[in-house]
Amino acid sequence: MEMTVVGVDVAKRVFQLTDITEFQIPAGQVYLSPVIDCFDGLVVSWSIGTRPDAKLVNTMPDSAIESVAGCKERPVVHSDRGAHYRWPGWLSWMPDARLIRSMSRKGCSPDNAACEGFFGHLKTELFYPRDGRATTVDKFFEVVDSYIRWYNAKRIKVSLGSLSPIEYRQSLGIAA
């Protein structure tokens, strides 16, 4: 199964979160690994695959790195203590990418709440209401990709003045 990797060009960021969530559909298991910007909840980059492995986690940040080119500050990428984020490849890759690695203490999940909140919205608004019996894995990839693009561009947040993350950035003069 091929993996889909998507990135969104964004302005300077300081603090981002990443994690993995799982969807069980009749056609198989699907995993999503996004990078969420703490500034406004924008999903900066994401990868979708059929295995929660190093390839899923390591491919997704490449798109996020492109969006911080020219950034003077080194962004912090926070994760839980999953094996993907303790893998030697990830550990050596982070400084090469000019990213600062941050990790939760064991049993301290609240510090990744913005990522978990995004997963909650995605599953409540997209996944749970759907009848996925006729959905293929590839079609589900497309549906999740489409939702994330809609979430970034159209889904309003009261905390952002009833604007979407992209609209909010545009209102501040930050290219999205």
Image (cartoon, rainbow, N blue to C red):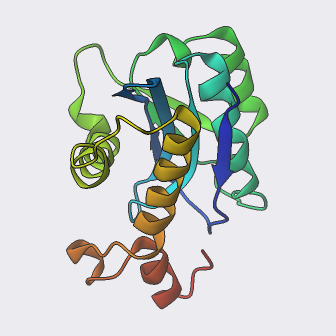
Residue 77: image location, x then y, percent: 52, 39
Q: Which of these two is toward me, 32 or 91? A: 32
The answer to whether residue 101 is left or right of residue 63 is: left
Answer yes or no: is residue 15 visible: no
Q: Residue at x 59, y 48 (%)?
A: 75
Image location of residue 134, percent across then percent down: 41, 38
Residue 100 drawn above or below residue 168: above
Q: Is residue 99 left or right of residue 123?
A: right
Tell which of 99 and 52 is nearer to you: 52
Q: Write down the quadrant of residue 112 in the picture.
A: top left
Q: Is residue 88 above or below residue 95?
A: above
- Looking at the image, residue 97 sits to the left or right of residue 144; the answer is right
Q: Quadrant of the C terminus?
A: bottom right
Residue at the extreme front of the image, as rendered: 134
Q: Quadrant of residue 42?
A: bottom left
Which quarter of the image is occupied by the N terminus? top right
Asked if 61 appears above or below 8 in the picture, the reply is above
Horizontal and vertical percent position of residue 109: 24, 27
Count of labels in the image: 0
Answer whether residue 65 is visible to the viewer in this image: yes
Residue at the spot x=40%, y=16% of the render? 81
Residue 51 or residue 106, whichever sits in front: 51
Image location (x, y in percent) of residue 141: 54, 42
